[in-house]
Amino acid sequence: MMYDTTIGRPSGFTLVELLVAVSISLVLVSAAALVLSVGMRTFASTAGSGEAELREVQFVSALAQDIASAMPLNGDAFIGNAASMTFPRLLSPTRRLGDVVIAFVSWNHDARHGWVRVLTLPDGGTTREAFGRMEDVRLSYAGDGDDSSPSGAAAVEWFDQWTHRRFPGVVQIKARGFALQVALMCSAYTLAEEESHR
């Protein structure tokens, strides 16, 4: 053993000094782990909200595209309420006779899968796309509710449910602080507030 020549005791750390050093190290490592776990939880929640917003944008985009392409083809009706719609849509928009492909679209909200889009093709094949749960999405419909009047003759009204023979002119999608109004391709209607902007 080496001796400290100035005092006369062996050099090194005492048991008390080692225990104090280990205790301080444990406190510092615990604090670092706590800061790291809070940061990781914050990152995970931020990443999750970004994914939810992207899913919502994809949902609204697909819904708006289907609505804009809705057409009264083959005598099929447009049926809708606050949480579902069913209608025929133009799948391949060409103007030549015989080149038009018509699909049947159904949008429904169910508790298990959230918003689901089912596209039925002319050959009977279907594609199903689930968009997950979207908070507080409501659909409403604007158009002439009087099936007996000529198109565009009556005042345009908003409905929570669309069961009229005629297609609506506009479908409104309301969700978490925004409202998007989508005009149907076959629409002969303009809303009063849109007319004032022209």
Image (cartoon, rainbow, N blue to C red):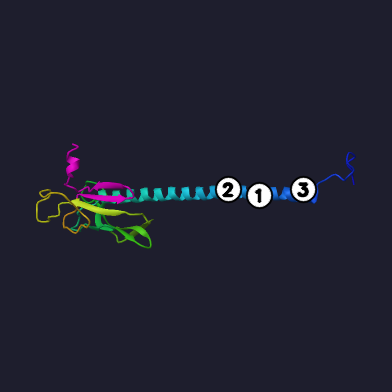
The quadrant in which residue 125 appears is bottom left
In front: 175, or 13? 13
Describe residue 12's horizontal placement relative to residue 173 as left or right: right
Segment colored magenta: 169-198
Describe residue 156's horizontal placement relative to residue 30 as left or right: left
Determine crowd level at label 2: few under 14, some 14-19, many 20+ residues with C-alpha closer than 10 A.
few
Element under disc 3: helix
Q: Which residue is mark 3?
A: 17
Determine crowd level at label 3: few under 14, some 14-19, many 20+ residues with C-alpha closer than 10 A.
few
Q: Earlier in the sequence, mark 3 or mark 1?
A: 3
Q: Which residue is mark 2?
A: 36
Q: Residue 124 location in percent, x, y?
A: 30, 61
In front: 182, or 159? 159
In front: 5, or 171? 5
Q: How many angstroms separate mark 3 from mark 2 (CA)?
A: 29 Å
Name which residue type carries label 2.
Answer: Leu
Q: Residue 110 location in percent, x, y?
A: 34, 62
Q: Which mark identifies residue 139?
A: none
Which of label 3 and label 2 is nearer to you? Answer: 3
Name which residue type carries label 1.
Answer: Val
Determine crowd level at label 1: few under 14, some 14-19, many 20+ residues with C-alpha closer than 10 A.
few
Name which residue type carries label 3.
Answer: Glu
Q: Earlier in the sequence, mark 1 or mark 2?
A: 1
Residue furthest to the front = 7
- The stretch drawn in magenta includes residue 173: yes
